[in-house]
Amino acid sequence: MIWFKSAYCRITLTKTTLAFFLFTFAHCFIQSLVQSFLFQLDSDACSLTSEIVSAAKVPKNVFAWLSESHNDTTDSNKYTLRLCDQIPFEKSEEENPCVVVFDSDDLGVNEVPNGFRRRDVSSSDKRDVDVSSLNRTSEEFPTSLTQAFIQPVFDESSNISAVELAIPDINDGQMVSLSAQCTRVVLYADQVLINSKREVFALIGSEFWLLSTSTIALMYGSIAHLYAALAFRVLSVGWSAYSIWRTHDIDRRFDVLLTSGACGVDLFPGYVKPRIAIQSVDLSLNVLALILMAYLCSRLVRTYTTVMFRCIGPPDHVVRIHRYVLGLFTCLQVSVYLLVTSAALWLDQLRNGAIASISSHMSLYLSIFIVTLVLLIPWIWIGWRSVRFEHRRLLYVFVGLGLLFEAGWSGMYESLVWRWTWIEWPFFASTAVASQAILIASVVFGIICRLNFGKGLKQYLQAASALEKEDFEPEIFESSNRNCAAPNQNDDDGWAADIEKRIMTERLSQALDFGAHQPAPPPSPPSWSIPAVPPKAAAAAAATVPQSTWTSAEQTTRPTSFTSVLPTLPTLDKFSPWSKPDEHDEKGGDPMFRF
């Protein structure tokens, strides 16, 4: 209950913090809803392609490879689709593991070669379908595939020669016969749509990560978390803009391969236009979110910086070092999502992707990324603690682990499977490159922070922590830094003043609550029960006390130790300004460094 009260207090601390939280929560909800619409479109289209590939019994150990080149004769792009059972890199002509199943400049390529057809079924494997349902109009058909008519067609040798398809949205609900070449081309569309579903999952996860990061920033006044959320908003805008272009490019490929190519029919009439419309909404929301977050973050950063630097005005070089520390913490926060997402996408490809059956070093790849995920959180904690308390040995461990992660990810480019996935899947390539960039930036910032150890940042943070524990009023100190001047009280109803008042009110309330539960002191004895001392006895007792004579010099001399003249009092476990603060005390640090 106390934690929830504290969280509520910090979220509603000012109008800016409340607006930031409500905006982040609303954007997370709306973006998740938008991404769920995209996922539904991808799921419906992917269900159709998977049904066709399954009915055609396309071998599971092959994958599609589409190459694009420019034809100088016709001044147009040439598309060539191949089916491969091995990665085609570094293979000679004799060892070529791929066969051409479609060529946009040679439509006579329509035979499925040996080894790329299956004879696992007989004519008795046809599905039982209510054929009378095919006479319904398009409006009477559901959007799902539960009543679709999909069945294989066998030749005299019991090989699957075609797949019959009848869906209301395709060819006005009339029967369509898809050749064996068409079903192999559909395999490429199936791979693209499955990857699109994975991308949507990752983007939905990013919205919840942003919500948690923004909430932590408000709870602990962390500027690093604010910068991390803002940096990721920039990445979201960039990817949203790119995804619209990519959807148009996918539509062009599907048109060449399927509609105008091997199939002769548009299998996705209701896919591209709705997806572009939803992606346009997604881009607009992300641009608006970036503008609002940049504005709110600028106000929050100024507020948190002002409150932190008003206690003791740090010199300019300490402020500069502190910026390097913030850069490191920002990289660590962003690395949480990017590294986890990249590793999860790669592991999913290894287990469920098209390359699952051809990877020869599955155990090695799994071990590398599982170790990365296990050591990620300890690595972030080591980086924070080593920089916050200037632990040199811990920082060496942090830099060493960062270089080890970077070496492991860089070494993956020696893998043919990794390079293939990197080239064929832009979203995976983007997250992988961003992850490596964040790793390098974290190591660089760590080294810069190490070079600035012992220059005053640690002492400043310890002093700020001690003063915060003692509830010293910030106004009794004057800052010599021109950038740490007191904020304008008319700006947003006095941010800094409001923050200080609310925090002091919260602390006073907690102190009063604590005192209300303390036992009452024992009552004093009544005055009439104390025996009176005779005047003569009191005079005799006073005569026995030795009298000290003080000279004028001794009366003006200040004692060298106040503790020698003070009576012994029970300790209250409070901070003593004459004792050295515990450098391992992490609870009292400034709010910016509390994760």
Image: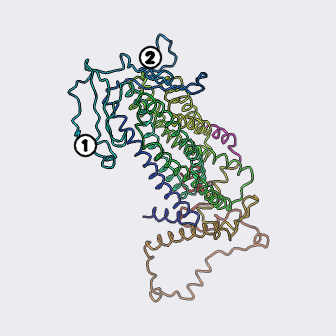
Please rate how many residues cluster around mark 1, counting C-alpha atoms within 10 Å: few if below 14, some from 14 to 19, many from 20.
some
SS for callout 2: loop
Is residue 285 depicted above or below 179 in this figure? below
Q: Classify mark 1: helix, strand or loop.
A: helix
Query: Which mark, residue 245?
Result: none
Residue 578 shows in the view: no
Q: What secondary structure is the magenta-colored segment mainly?
A: helix
**In terms of depth relative to the viewer, which is nearer, 18 or 320?**
18
Does the residue at mark 1 contact the one at mark 2 (Cβ under 8 Å)?
no
Q: Residue furthest right?
A: 553
Amino acid type, label 1: Ser
Q: Amino acid at mark 2?
A: Pro
Q: Which residue is mark 1?
A: 133
**Mark 2 crowd level (few <14, some 14–19, many ≥20, 10 Å Cα):** some
**Per the image, is 450 magenta?**
yes
| Segment colored magenta | 443-455
Q: Quadrant of residue 467?
A: bottom right
Question: Considering only order in the chain, which callout, 2 or 1, is on the residue closer to the N terminus?
Answer: 2
Across the whole image, how many numbered discs are drawn on residues? 2
Mark 2 lies on residue: 97
Let me know if residue 197 appears in the view.
yes
| Residue beneath the point at 53% across and 66% down | 12
Which quadrant would the N terminus be assigned to in this image?
Answer: bottom left
In the picture, measured across the screen, residue 501 lies left or right of residue 270, that is right
- Residue nearest the observer in this picture, 472 or 436: 436
Disc 1 from disc 2: Cα separation: 43 Å
- Looking at the image, residue 483 sits to the left or right of residue 215; the answer is right
Residue 30 locus on image (x, y percent): 47, 55
Vertically, is 8 above or below 200? below
User: Residue 264 appears at what percent x and percent y?
Assistant: 41, 31
**In x, y percent, where is residue 98?**
45, 18
Viewer-side label of 1, 2: 1
